[in-house]
């Protein structure tokens, strides 16, 4: 037995054991200067690695054309369990291979996101430099075209202004030099904070509301003075007669906007601990792990790219409130839609009353064309408010009915309904939206959604969707909820 080719014996644990027990030196490299540990690492053979190390294999043995360690090989292949095992045996992730890359740099180059997350969580500095003085962020911006892993690395707060030793370039310089447009975007974005964006959005909304009113005012500015007065009186009338509805509408708008929809929160330390625990228990699954928030996604949650956070029991990112609708504020959103419909409905009704009292025309006597001309001449401001109210009435009523149907009859969110409908297009059988584990029947669905019971007949099931990761046992219906 002169040489053991790792490739030849791959997979035959007993045979490897026999040969080693018979006296073969586990440190002996093959003709390509590759050790047994390298072959076991590249093939993710945890049992063989444990065995070889127990027999004296050197965990950081250099080998192969690039003078790499077994850890480098495992990283290139993206074997997270092997990386965890080798680190447990004391492998040094700071060692640099023949191309000048350390472990984290290799993980970046090969876009092994779970390994990047694990290495950083285990204490590897996100700003460590390779032989060229490049940080992982510079390497990513320079060598890996596309938004990832640049975007992913930015979650770990790397230094944005540090420069490399040779070219004195920042990560942004490298991204520009490589024409990596997506990375440039991500790096430029990295400074803006969520709170500032929300304040901007609110100001924008206020500005648009003010503009709408101003447009109406300007439209009416050149009209006769009695019309101006009349319009102002009508406005006053609207406001006073609709005061409770308007107050409720504004209140629920504010509550929808201001209440946390269920953003996931975790400190940097908690995130790192979480990554280590998930990786070491074999559950670092990127289908259930959010690579933007660096947290395990709760059941029914989704990452909102506008809010840049995962949102519990995600429904939608609402255009009208500029906020996500999720577990925390969904019920306020329903009330907001309801009172918006009521307010718009009243404005439409009062506009007709105004025209019948103040315009010397009727639809029956003059016909449609004259009637329209007359009401435009009568008060452009009222017409403008009428059109605005009709527009908002149509979408808010449509959404309200649609939302109530989904909540009461399906027990689903808008997002879940849409993704189920998308899935059903690829299925041979028709998919019933009513037969999901979240549908617990009309009354129970409503009780759960509004979190209130009905004189003891129905009790809401208190599921905290911000921290629910697995199926839920439902005491009321003895049903098991599963992910859809
Ligand atoms: Zn997320
Ligand atoms: Zn959002």
Image (cartoon, rainbow, N blue to C red):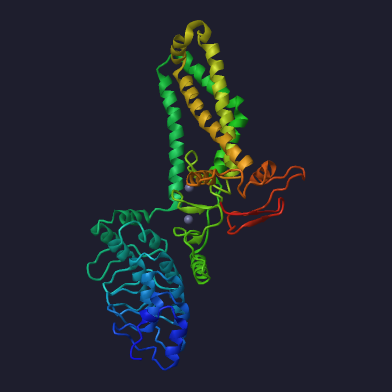
Side (left or right) of 74 relative to 424: left
Place of residue 380 in the rendered image (x, y in percent of width and height, measured from the top left):
44, 18
Looking at this view, name the residue that lies furthest to the top.
365
Question: 290 and 213: which one is in front?
Answer: 290
Place of residue 399 in the rendered image (x, y in percent of width and height, measured from the top left):
54, 35
- Quadrant location of the N terminus? bottom left
Question: 40 and 250: which one is in front?
Answer: 40
Looking at this view, name the residue that lies furthest to the right.
456
Side (left or right) of 2 relative to 324: left
Place of residue 350 in the rendered image (x, y in percent of width and height, measured from the top left):
56, 20
| Residue 15 visible | yes
Side (left or right) of 457 relative to 69: right
Identified at 66% across, 44% down, the residue is: 445
| Residue 161 visible | no
Question: 48 and 12: which one is in front?
Answer: 12
> For residue 65, what is the image quadrant?
bottom left
Side (left or right) of 364 relative to 445: left
Place of residue 414 in the rendered image (x, y in percent of width and height, measured from the top left):
53, 43
Relative to 290, residue 14 above or below? below
Looking at this view, name the residue that lies furthest to the bottom.
23
Relative to 261, residue 123 above or below? below
> For residue 352, what is the image quadrant?
top right
């Amino acid at each position: 037995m002169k040489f053991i080719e790792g490739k030849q014996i791959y997979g035959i644990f007993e045979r490897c054991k026999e040969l080693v027990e018979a006296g073969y030196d586990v440190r002996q490299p093959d003709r390509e200067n590759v050790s047994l540990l390298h072959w076991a690492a590249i093939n993710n053979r945890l049992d063989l690695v444990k065995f070889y190390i127990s027999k004296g294999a050197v965990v950081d043995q250099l080998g192969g054309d690039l003078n790499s360690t077994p850890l480098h090989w495992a990283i290139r292949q993206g074997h997270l369990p092997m990386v965890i095992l080798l680190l447990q045996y004391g492998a040094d992730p700071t060692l640099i291979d023949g191309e000048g890359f350390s472990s984290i740099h290799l993980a970046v180059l090969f876009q092994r996101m779970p390994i990047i997350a694990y290495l950083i969580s285990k204490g590897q500095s996100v700003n460590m430099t390779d032989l060229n003085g490049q940080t992982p962020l510079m390497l990513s911006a320079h060598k890996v075209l596309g938004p990832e892993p640049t975007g992913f690395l930015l979650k770990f707060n790397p230094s944005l202004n540090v420069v490399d030793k040779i070219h004195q370039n920042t990560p942004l310089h490298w991204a520009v030099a490589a024409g990596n447009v997506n990375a440039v975007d991500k790096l430029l974005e990295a400074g803006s904070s969520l709170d500032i964006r929300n304040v901007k959005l609110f100001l924008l909304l206020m500005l648009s509301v003010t503009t709408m009113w101003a447009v109406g005012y300007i439209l009416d500015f050149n009209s006769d003075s009695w019309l101006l007065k009349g319009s102002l009186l009508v406005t006053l009338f609207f406001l006073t007669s609709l005061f409770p509805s308007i107050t409720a509408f504004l209140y629920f708008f504010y509550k929808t906007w201001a209440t946390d929809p269920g953003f996931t929160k975790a400190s940097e330390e908690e995130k790192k601990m979480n990554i280590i625990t998930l990786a070491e228990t074999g559950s670092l699954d990127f289908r259930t792990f959010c690579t933007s928030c660096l947290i395990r996604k709760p059941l029914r949650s989704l990452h909102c790219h506008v809010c840049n956070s995962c949102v519990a029991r995600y429904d939608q990112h609402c255009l009208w409130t500029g906020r996500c609708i999720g577990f925390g504020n969904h019920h306020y959103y329903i009330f907001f839609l309801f009172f918006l419909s009521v307010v718009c409905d009243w404005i439409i009704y009062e506009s007709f009353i105004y025209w019948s009292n103040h315009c010397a025309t009727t639809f029956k006597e003059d016909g449609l064309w004259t009637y329209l001309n007359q009401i435009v001449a009568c008060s452009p401001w009222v017409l403008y408010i009428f059109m605005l109210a009709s527009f908002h009435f149509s979408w808010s009523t449509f959404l309200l009915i649609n939302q109530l149907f989904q909540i009461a009859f399906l027990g689903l969110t808008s997002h879940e309904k849409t993704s189920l409908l998308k899935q059903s297009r690829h299925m041979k059988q028709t998919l019933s939206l009513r037969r999901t584990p979240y549908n617990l029947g009309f009354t129970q669905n409503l009780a759960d959604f509004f979190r209130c019971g009905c004189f003891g007949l129905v009790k809401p099931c208190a599921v905290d969707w911000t921290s629910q990761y697995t199926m839920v046992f439902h005491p009321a219906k003895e049903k098991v909820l599963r992910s859809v």
